């Protein structure tokens, strides 16, 4: 069975459309939407998202940068640290290009991923349940 030139062109256009249809840059500063883009789910009743900023490249490998300020109970923090195998971080690392609202004080406990010495940081204040998250995957 022979496929004519027009059919081949239509198949090529269809395949390219499917291939590139999900390849659009994503950005948001809507707190709940930022959380959902980052985690893939809506915040639960015990997660109050105060601020957020999200950027995701159009690249297929899901490169992103996320900033979140939120409130969650101590149990949430403990579970998050455990699930992500976070380690305490004692480096004095400044995060460039952070939004003006992203300003954890020196009173925060700072964590990092064990395989990520230079990038993502997680700040927890167990006194008022406030959390700042800076995560980057490039």
Image (cartoon, helix red, strand yellow):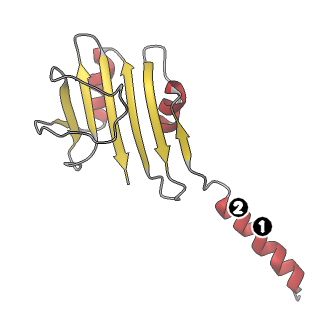
* Percent position of residue 88, x then y: 15, 34
* Percent position of residue 54, x then y: 47, 38
Q: Which mark is residue 18?
A: 2
Distance from disc 2 to disc 1, alpha carbons, whole Å, reads 6 Å
Neighbour tally class for label 1: few under 14, some 14-19, many 20 plus, Cα within 10 Å: few
Q: Which mark is residue 95?
A: none
Q: Quadrant of the N terminus?
A: bottom right
Q: Is residue 3 above or below residue 63?
A: below
* Percent position of residue 125, x then y: 23, 18
Q: Residue at x 27, y 10 (%)?
A: 128
- Left or right placement of residue 10 versus residue 21 in this view: right
Question: Does the image show residue 42?
Answer: no
- Left or right placement of residue 80 versus residue 88 in this view: right
The quadrant holding residue 126 is top left
Marks 2,1: beta carbons within 8 A = yes
- Left or right placement of residue 58 versus residue 52 in this view: right
* Percent position of residue 123, x then y: 25, 28
- Left or right placement of residue 92 versus residue 46 in this view: left
Secondary structure, mark 1, is helix
Secondary structure, mark 2, is helix
Q: Is residue 99 above or below residue 97?
A: above
Q: Which mark is residue 14?
A: 1
Give 32 or 85, whichever is nearer the viewer: 32
Q: Quadrant of the C terminus?
A: bottom left
Q: Is residue 19 above or below residue 129?
A: below
């Amino acid at each position: 069975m022979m496929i004519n030139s027009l059919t081949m062109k239509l198949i090529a256009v269809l395949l390219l459309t499917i291939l590139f249809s999900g390849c659009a840059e994503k950005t948001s500063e809507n707190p709940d939407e930022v959380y959902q883009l980052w985690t893939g789910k809506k915040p639960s009743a015990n997660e109050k998202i105060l601020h957020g900023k999200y950027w995701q490249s159009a690249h297929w490998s899901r490169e992103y940068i996320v900033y979140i300020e939120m409130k969650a109970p101590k149990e949430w923090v403990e579970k998050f640290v455990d699930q992500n195998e976070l380690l305490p971080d004692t480096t004095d690392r400044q995060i460039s290009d952070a939004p003006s609202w992203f300003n954890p004080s020196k009173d925060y406990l700072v964590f990092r991923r064990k395989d990520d010495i230079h990038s993502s940081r997680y700040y927890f204040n167990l006194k008022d349940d406030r959390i700042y998250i800076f995560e980057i995957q490039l």
